[in-house]
Amino acid sequence: MRVIFYLFILFMIVAVLYMAVALLNKSGNTYEPYSKEDALGLPAMTIPEDNPLTAEKVALGRKLFMDRRLSQNNTISCAMCHVPEQGFVVNEIATAVGLEGRTHKRNAPTIFNVGYYKHLFHDGREFSLENQIIGPLLAENEMGNPSIGFVIEKINSFPDYQGLFEQAFDGQKANLERVNLAIASYERTMVSGNSRFDQWYFGKNEKALNEREINGFRLFSGKANCISCHTINKDSALFTDQSFHNTGAGWSRNNKVLSNLVKKEASKHTFPVSLAPGITVEVANDHFDKASETPKNDVGRFEVTSNPDDSWLYKTPSLRNIELTAPYMHDGSLRTLESVVDFYNVGGEDNPYKDQRMVPLGLTQEEKADLVAFMNALTGSNVKRLEKEAREAYFEAPVP
């Protein structure tokens, strides 16, 4: 009888532990959207206490990110400017295009590793992933909605969203806050480390990089001094100081340095244009210039702070996955890493506010090639998986 009693007690303990684990999983406290391997070379991410990651919330955020019905006329989703197959940017055009073909004056930044950033957008106007979606939803050259209430009413009317917000938010229906929380949760899962550089530098795998790439790193952290803004710490590297600088890019619409580099690009390169997911064709660069409109005036962070000292300052972008996220610079004016290196090698475009570190570098052709080779070694090991997961969610979204 005593044996049966002890077995019963043991059974009850196991049952309670099982239920506790199940509840813990349901609450999301043990949800891990990426592996420790994926994050090699990246710091620990701070997750807001009021928005813990859960599987339900991330799946909902991914669905919202891909859904064109969140725009005023059902044509533009977040993924239309942050295309999964194109490094979560738009490779084909210098600056993004929103509702009814309305253009932006800046290009779309990638969402890779966006959960680590202190400032969002090129001018740093937003500080929180939970808040950054509001602007694009309402901007007339992005998703063009007349009001947030208009968006929420649409979402609540869609049959395929029935129950999803309730599952993710303890029985509560869609509202602005929960849309923000869900999309922010998805964006925080876009963690991409474990590049060949990470394996070499942080993982101590001496064979992960070749000699050209290693020499490129020496130039990056030495003669070229890229590391002064694209920082590398002892235990991790975001490849950004999360600050703002004036390199001369965008200083003048008659920018001689950039104009010459663009002409040089057009004579040397083609560029992949996506016709459908996974299907691309090569198009000569000069065709892009013929199809581009005159860039709009842009004075950078000054437009946020109204501080004259912030004129033509732009946020330092991370270099992780940089080979996937062309075109480059805040205005998408350079389409290749070779041209970016050329721009910095001549010291950028002169202007009274230019960062004092922007000086001619004197790099040889071989050194410039080594520097590009190094940057190409910064691509994360999981980008194809992140792309695949996003694409699957895109095809699950109903066609308006």
Image (cartoon, helix red, strand yellow):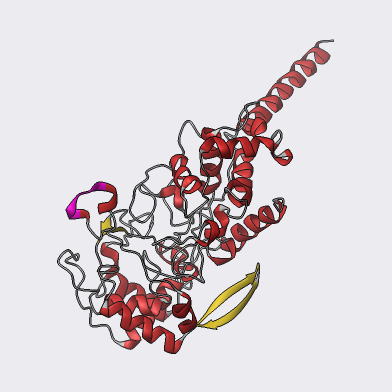
| Residue in the image at 43% along x and 75% along y | 335
Corner quadrant of residue 274? bottom right
| Residue in the image at 58% along x and 53% along y | 77
Q: Main secondary structure of the magenta part?
A: helix
- Above/below status of 79 relative to 24: below
Q: Is residue 85 left or right of residue 300?
A: right
Q: Is residue 380 magenta?
A: no
Q: Position of residue 265 (x, y in %)?
A: 41, 84
How many labels, in total?
0
Q: Is residue 308 magenta?
A: yes
Most foreground residue, 265 or 235? 265
Q: Position of residue 124 (x, y in %)?
A: 34, 50
Q: Is residue 231 left or right of residue 292?
A: left
Most foreground residue, 60 or 6? 60
Corner quadrant of residue 57? top right
Corner quadrant of residue 172? top right
From this viewpoint, which residue is outermost toward the top?
Answer: 1
Query: Magenta residues?
Result: 305-309
Residue 82 seen in render: no
Residue 351 seen in render: yes
| Residue in the image at 37% along x and 79% along y | 339
From this viewpoint, which residue is outermost toward the left?
Answer: 352
For the N terminus, the image quarter is top right
Q: Position of residue 73 (x, y in %)?
A: 60, 51
Q: Position of residue 273 (x, y in %)?
A: 57, 75
Q: Is residue 123 left or right of residue 205?
A: left
| Residue in the image at 63% along x and 48% along y | 69
- Above/below status of 373 relative to 242: below
